[in-house]
Amino acid sequence: MSDDNLLIDATTKIFEDLCDPQNINAAKDDSWKQLLWNALEESGLTSAWVPEEFGGAGASISDGFSIIEVAGKFAVPIALPETLLGGWLLSNANISVPKGIMAVAPTRPRDKVTIHSNGTLYGQVRGVPFASEADHIVAAIEDAVSTKVALVAKNNCEIKSFSGLSGDPRDTILFDNVDAISIQELEGDLSYRSVKLMGATIRSLQIGGALMAILELATEHAKTRVAFEKPIAKFQAVQHNLAKLANETAAAVAVANSAADTLANSPDNEQAIFFEASSAKIRTGEAVGEGTAIAHQVLGAIGFTEEHILHRFTQRLWDWRDDFGNESEWAVELGALIAENGPDELWPLLTTR
Amino acid sequence: MSQSINFDPIRLPPEAEELRLEVREFLADEIANGSFNPSSSILKSGFDREFSKRVGKRGWIGMTWPKKYGGQERSFLERYVVTEEFRSQNAPVTCHFTADRQSGPVLLKYAQEHIKLDILPRITAGDCCFCIGLSEPNSGSDLFAASTKATPTDGGYLINGTKLWTSNAHQADYMIGLFRTSPPTKENRRHGLTQFLVDLKQPNITINPVRNMAGKHDFNEVVFDDLFIPEDHLLGEVDSAWKQATSELAYERSGPERFLETYYMLPELVRVLGKEPDIRAKEGVGRLVAQLHTLRRMSVSVNGMLQAGKEPVLEGSIVKDVGTIWEQALPSKARELASFIDDEPGNRTNFDELLQFSTNIAPKLTIQGGTTEVLRGIIARGLGLR
Ligand SMILES: Cc1cc2nc3c(=O)[nH]c(=O)nc-3n(C[C@H](O)[C@H](O)[C@H](O)COP(=O)(O)OP(=O)(O)OC[C@H]3O[C@@H](n4cnc5c(N)ncnc54)[C@H](O)[C@@H]3O)c2cc1C
């Protein structure tokens, strides 16, 4: 077994024990959240992308992505991917990473945080996952000359609570003359767009993971649910719907892992990262639409209840496709690049990856 | 997880990328020499034996096969690069492609040694064209309904019956045919069919053209009237053809030709849209490119996993299903996205010509080589549903 598998198994075990969708769906309160967070923090999973010299676990980029894909499989409803991303951003800006939960802003392409001449932060950003549950907010800031990262105590910001389709927090943060704990420039070749592309890849992996989970849920359901005196899996229409769900899942898993591989193994190849990560967010977003519709169709009325866990996956899938650029937003950017390059550059671009 | 879907993020190795440059250079030379025109060759016959011979000279046909049969013992990922470069340039590969992909590997596995030594080197030289004789008037999706008969006779078999939809039979040298040697049994309706190598250049075979709706003559009716096939042309086990087609199928299903058949519409669309299309066209092109990139990554992954000795059977079927649906939808997407371009005279002549052609051939893409419904049945079996 490779180290990679050990990490995946260890992560899976924690989620099985403390974040089983069935159990938390039936839970009376949110007390499981703290237990889960503690277990993740103790095992170093929350600081995977923080180098050891900054007190983190110092895992590789690809290990962090593996953790995130598993989190997607369980539709984990806490800020683990956000905290990983926050740790990555802070480390790449040489800011020491605090303990606790982090949220990252902005997640919508047209929202902005700016730095006033006196060094304080301004701006309103919407739909920030888990901002209200976070201890700190990590903001990415683009100004005329550089990209900066700011670490801000959550309590210094004004938070308006909203929730997504899943009920997970997706809050509006108002930065109004807010003092940051630290503001530093992003290092190396990382740009504002790199941050969005990293976020897009993280969400693509979560989407792939959650699609695998609903494929399994729907397949198992079809084998056991009886209608007209046979398991509905015996109806060809159901088989073909599930085959289409498998197709969409496969496409999402493949393109998300390809983007993750690019970020992990070609971190300096800006063109490749844009092409792969934007494609991943576009294609996984498309897979969400068709995939969730099929899973719900197969589960029938049972899948439309609060009691059944299907919605834990499908609602988060709908939420995730809006984060860090949705399919339309990225498709316009990618299409613009293709048009600008012209027809003769299309095939060479496709075959670079 | 009961069934898992796995696509290792496999990249093409450096030797494959080096080969790509060689192939591009070869194709550029061919185009410069007028051997084919990439922007219109798709409208013409893709059959060009002289071209195939030049490809054979480069060692790019049967390139994964053992050297003693004329192969190069190169990897499937190297073959992948050759296949996709030829497809993307609309090179005329019809004469050699069926043998390269399908018939050659069947012979390698099931033919007798002297047959292999005779035929395989001719295939790799680009001078031996194969066709596939599976379908019949009353046997399409259900191959096990085939009724063309092979009756034992002195030193071989006599063939009687009709194959239908046989692509390129009129230009091919050989067919690999599926014939009935015994009736099916009660326990196994797949029993009783046998594969044979058929030399098409002999009497007692009548090949009648069947024109398709695009006005082309690609497929045929092939009538056998007491055709003699020598014993040693039998491929594999008598009555057991159904056992013989498993692992190769993943290659057959997952290659780049499974999503690139209408690819020419995409660069042509980008050409007519110009450098600054409207936002709707940008979005449409962006989505198409993301979808194509995804397909290609899936396809490379399946081929890489096969090369590594894994058996991604489910994944291979998925590539073909998603791929053929995509290439079928591409012409109509291109048509929609080109709706608002400026209509300067001559601007979209080539686009419109290709659009007409691709729209006309689109229906076949989800039928040839097994229909969408049959493929989804295979995927459903992979999911454990049947
Ligand atoms: C361009 C082209 C080239 C071809 N070249 C060759 C060739 O070289 N050699 C060769 O042998 N054959 C060739 N074929 C034939 C091809 O393999 C068959 O057309 C194909 O297998 C389908 O068979 P059919 O046309 O008889 O359709 P049918 O079997 O009659 O099926 C018609 C439709 O019925 C439905 N259907 C059938 N079975 C099922 C099922 N189990 N579940 C659900 N729905 C089902 C599907 O919607 C299907 O599309 C070619 C076909 C085309 C279009």
Image: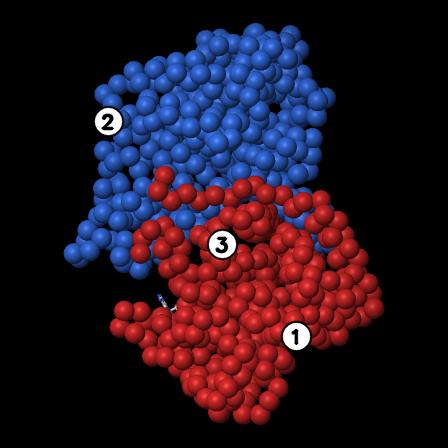
Chain colours: A blue, B red
For the N terminus of chain B, which image quadrant?
top left
Q: Earlier in the sequence, mark 1 or mark 3?
A: 1
Q: Which residue is mark 2?
A: A26
- Tell me the distance, in whole angstroms, between the alpha carbons under discs 1 and 2: 70 Å
Chain bearing mark 1:
B
Report the amino acid beneath label 1: Asp
From this view, report whether residue A142 is shown above or below residue B209: above
Front one among A8 and A54: A8
Front one among B274 and A209: A209
- Which residue occupies the extreme left position in the image? A229
From this view, report whether residue A159 is shown above or below residue A307: above
Q: Which residue is mark 3?
A: B316
Residue B56, by quadrant, is bottom right
Helix, strand or loop under label 2:
helix
Q: Which mark is residue B18?
A: none
From this view, report whether residue A352 is shown above or below residue A320: below
Helix, strand or loop under label 3:
helix
Chain bearing mark 2:
A
Q: Which residue is mark 1?
A: B118
From this view, report whether residue A16 is shown above or below residue B93: above
**Where is residue A273 drawn, in percent x and y?**
64, 36
**Where is residue B21 drawn, in percent x and y?**
76, 52
Q: Is mark 1 within 8 Å of ligand 1?
A: no
Count the numbered circles shown.
Answer: 3
Could you tell me if the residues under marks 1 and 3 are in contact, i.e. CB atoms within 8 Å? Answer: no
Disc 3 versus disc 2: nearer the observer: 3
Relative horizontal placement of residue A170, taking residue B356 as reference (left or right): left
Identified at 60% across, 40% down, the residue is A276
